[in-house]
Image: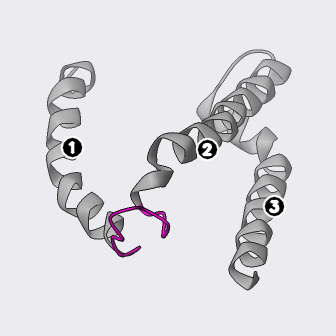
Amino acid sequence: MMTGAIGNIIEYYDFALFGYLATIIGANFFPSDNPAISVVAAFGAFAVGAIMRPVGAVIFGHIGAPECPDKRPIAVPLPATLRRLPAIRVILSAIFYPFYAG
């Protein structure tokens, strides 16, 4: 129960902080002649992230669920993810490097 409360507190802090800093984020990451468009773009990026959180939970939530039929420990997904991150980083760098090479 306490971990759920702590998670909700952190989540709402994230929402409040992003809402408070939306004008700054919009101006720095989505520059435009019209400041309203920058703010709308910042909130659009936030909306995409907020929508994808439950989608990711549905898709990947079974990996660390304690009620899995095979009774895998909950701590399994994090090390497995951390082992895959270097390969993912190399692949993404190879894909997007030509766009940054100038």
Q: Which stretch did the figure color magenta?
A: 64-75
Q: Which residue is nearer to you in this view: 32 or 87?
A: 87
Q: Which color scheme is applied?
A: one colour
Label 2: state its secondary structure. Answer: helix
Locate residue 36 relative to residue 47 in the image: left or right: right
Amino acid type of the residue that numbered disc 3 sits on in the rendered structure: Tyr
Give me the residue at 17% from left, 53% from top.
Answer: 86
Main SS of residues in magenta: loop
Give me the residue at 80% from left, 39% from top.
Answer: 23
Which residue is identified by label 2? 53
Classify 10 Å Cα crowding around label 2: few (below 14), some (14-19), many (20 and above). few
**In the figure, 34 relative to 56: above or below?**
above
Specify the farthest residue to the bottom: 2
Which residue is identified by label 3? 12
For marks 2 and 1, give the CA distance. 20 Å
- Residue 3 located within the stretch drawn in magenta: no
